[in-house]
Image (tube, rainbow, N blue to C red):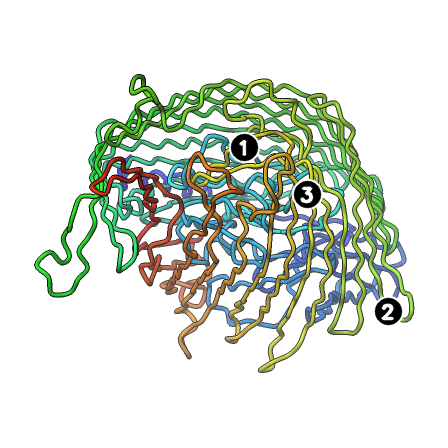
Amino acid sequence: MALSSRIAFLITVALLTVTFLPSLSGQDRILKGLVTDSTGTVIQGVSVYLPAYGTGTVTEKDGTFRLMLAPEMTEQVRVIFSCTGYLADTITVVAANLPGQLHIHLAGETVNIGEVSIRASRPDNTTIINIPSVVGAVIPSVSGGIESAIATLPGVATFSELSYSYSVRGGSYDENLVYINDVEVYRPYLIRSGQQEGLSRINPDLAASVHFSPGGFSASYGDRMSSVLDITYREPEEREGSVSLSLLTSSAHAGARSRNNMFWFLAGARYRNNSILLGSLDSKGDYRPRFADIQAIAGYTPDRRTRVTLSLWGSSNNYIFIPRSQTTTFGTIENAYRLYAFFDGGERDRYINGGLALTLGLRHSDMLSSKLILSAYLADESESYDIRGAYSLSALDKTEGTENNPDTLLNAGAGSWLSHARNRLRAGVAGLTYKGSFTRGRNNLDWGIAAKYRGFDSFRNEWLRVDSAGYTLGADGEGLTLTSWSDNSTSLASFTSEAYLISRNSFFMAGRQWELNAGVRASYDTYYSEMLVSPRLSLRVNLSDRLSAYMAAGSYHQPPGGREIMIENESGQPLLRAQRSYHLTAGARYDFIAWDRPFRFTVEAYGKLFNRLVPYSIDNVRLVYYGGNIAEGYSAGVDMRINGEFVQGAESWFSLSLMKSEMNIPSYSSGWYPAPFDQRVNFSIFFQDYLPGHPDFRAHINITFGTGIPASPPGRDQWDIWFRMPPYRRIDIGFSKILVGPDRMNKDSFLRELVAGFEIFNLADIRNTISYTWIRTVRNSEGETREYAVPNYLTKRSLNLKLTARF
């Protein structure tokens, strides 16, 4: 699709939807509303208190509250909104004439520049971190989206700017839970590299709240061993819309609410083409990535106790690559090499998925509520390529002043390779979930039961042959030896039943306020016929108005999924069982004032033990599992973060993580060895600034540094031979200017805001390594065999332009 037609399509969709959808209104005898901070991030646990009557409530996870007013409340009622870490706010309402929906903003006033300013905070519920839902639109990054913000948090590491995948505290990509509106989200299964990955399932234009826990999360969340990311899409308060255009991703969204406040609708569409970025890779050719998705959610509220929502989503990610040549220079000043290769053939991949979720929410009383969720997910993925190449590996003359500098000095090897794949996967998941909640005062009881069907069918046939002067010949000089191969098919069909029970209590003891979250989760899956029980506990205490401490502990299981059951070329493999981990986390949070602005320092120490692990290796962003439940391991470290308004009205943060993660395979390895995602040090900065006196011109910078993770040559055991890849270092910077804002237009104008910006990715033009291509030279001039690790570099410096209009 051409750029001009793409732009016209997005603009037409947004304008027609916004123009013809009805507007809002509404009222009731119940005091209800939404509490957010000054950036629009919802705040959970805000006290809504009526001092004259000694009654009140607290906001729920999505920031909403509902408070029934007694019949005697007929005059003006004073309402106080308060929460630790925010400035209290007081309003007065007339009980006999209540507004339909209150929208309360807490925290200090920030400079209104028409652009969203980011605020990240940790609410008072132990390990959960609350970050702004709009962060993906502000932080400069290649992939964009909510995951870019997650990657800046302590304990989180990313190794490719092209991928949405992230590792948390030494865990793999598959160990992270993601929810959108209480429905689990699944990653593509056959993805091998970041350039194939396409669009994230999370649309930042639609998000209302973002909660992330790097470990020690409660029993209400499912079974994964590392982290949980919980996204809630918002309900529009009025007619709204936006169109965003850029050289990478273009999007449009629209939403509206009916006049009687009973119906609402929110939808978004996106299109991404990252061929400009891929053109900076060493592999040159014709890149044709085409990624698109659409998501919609609609709600119906017939009365104040009933809510029905329907969510639909679908995406189509297509990746075509016709390679032509590759030139890669690598090594050191003393030993520098250059690989030149030319190719024939091509690659065609397709990843299609979609689903729906129907939710019925019931509020039986002010204390009791329940929710019933019916969901389904389908995926169809295919990967096909036949690529033939010939290469020449040469040593470079780095001696200054010689006639060869910087040309090649001698040929170190020559050969060819041939790669082939015909891979296919179909997956289907259907589930029915019931959740209930009972609240009385500051105590809460949550429970839930669920039934889920999982079905996977995968067919894999792929092989690679690298030939260098007879290297691929068999031992007798005849026959052909493949460098690597995989030819298998796998099927899984199982039913899973789950249940959880959680008690959340707030109480005073020894003159201090305590909060306790104790729960247990149980599940049974017919695939491995094993009952899994996971007790989980967290406790927090306020030591002072500014200092609090907390701890969390629990057991976490991870049943076999689609990728774990794709064991490479192993027959007679015993049935996989759930992997297990045990978390222990302790932390403290200190709030302080500097330069008359609020800041927060958080430190968290953790330890995780693993057993029944399925070991794996990393190939770019693909995880290759092998051996069954034969490994054990541990991760331990410290995470630190400081966030606050270093510049008035613009919040920034600094994150530092120190970690050690190791594995052991008692029946094979001779001892402990670094886990595949053992990144010892990770440091990240997100910083916002604006021109003094011109707050409509802002700059955003995103800096990441992470030490290298282990890598091993193909065909060698990870515990036997390994080395560390170079550190991942990257600087992305973005600038934005408000061309049209609230202070520059008529109040009746259809256009609310127009923002132009540009981003510079990889500002320092650092060549980061994501993986290696291994080349062996045979019978060279010295009569010896050598292996060369040719790095596969990520993207070079590039520029992106953006234009966003909000209606």
Q: Distance between the residues labelled 3 and 2?
A: 35 Å
Among numbered discs 3 and 1, the one appearing first in the sequence = 3
Pick whichever, 682 or 515, lies toward us: 682
- The answer to whether residue 134 of the structure is visible from this angle is no
* Secondary structure under the numbered disc 1 in the rendered image: strand
Q: Name the residue under label 2.
A: 512
Pick whichever, 745 or 630, lies toward us: 630
Q: Name the residue under label 3.
A: 610
Q: In the rendered image, which quarter contains the N terminus? A: top left
Pair 1/2: label in front? 1
In this rendering, the answer to whether 722 lies above or below 689 is above
* Secondary structure under the numbered disc 3 in the rendered image: strand
Identity of the residue drawn at 32% across and 44% down: 788
Residue furthest right in the image: 510
Residue furthest front in the image: 783
Among numbered discs 3 and 2, the one appearing first in the sequence = 2
In this rendering, the answer to whether 156 lies above or below 719 is below
How many tags in the picture? Answer: 3
Q: In this view, does 213 lie to the left or right of 743?
A: right
In this rendering, the answer to whether 263 lies above or below 597 is above
Q: Where is residue 537 in the image (x, y as percent from the top left)?
A: 80, 50
Q: Mark 1 points at which residue?
A: 625
Q: In this view, does 379 lie to the left or right of 739?
A: right
Q: Distance between the residues labelled 1 and 2?
A: 48 Å
* Amino acid on which disc 3 is placed: Phe
* Amino acid on which disc 1 is placed: Tyr
Among numbered discs 1 and 2, the one appearing first in the sequence = 2
Q: Where is residue 118 in the image (x, y as percent from the top left)?
A: 53, 63
Pair 3/2: label in front? 3
Identity of the residue drawn at 63% across and 58% down: 637
- Tell me the crowding category of disc 3: few under 14, some 14 to 19, or many 20 or more residues within 10 angstroms, Cα based: many
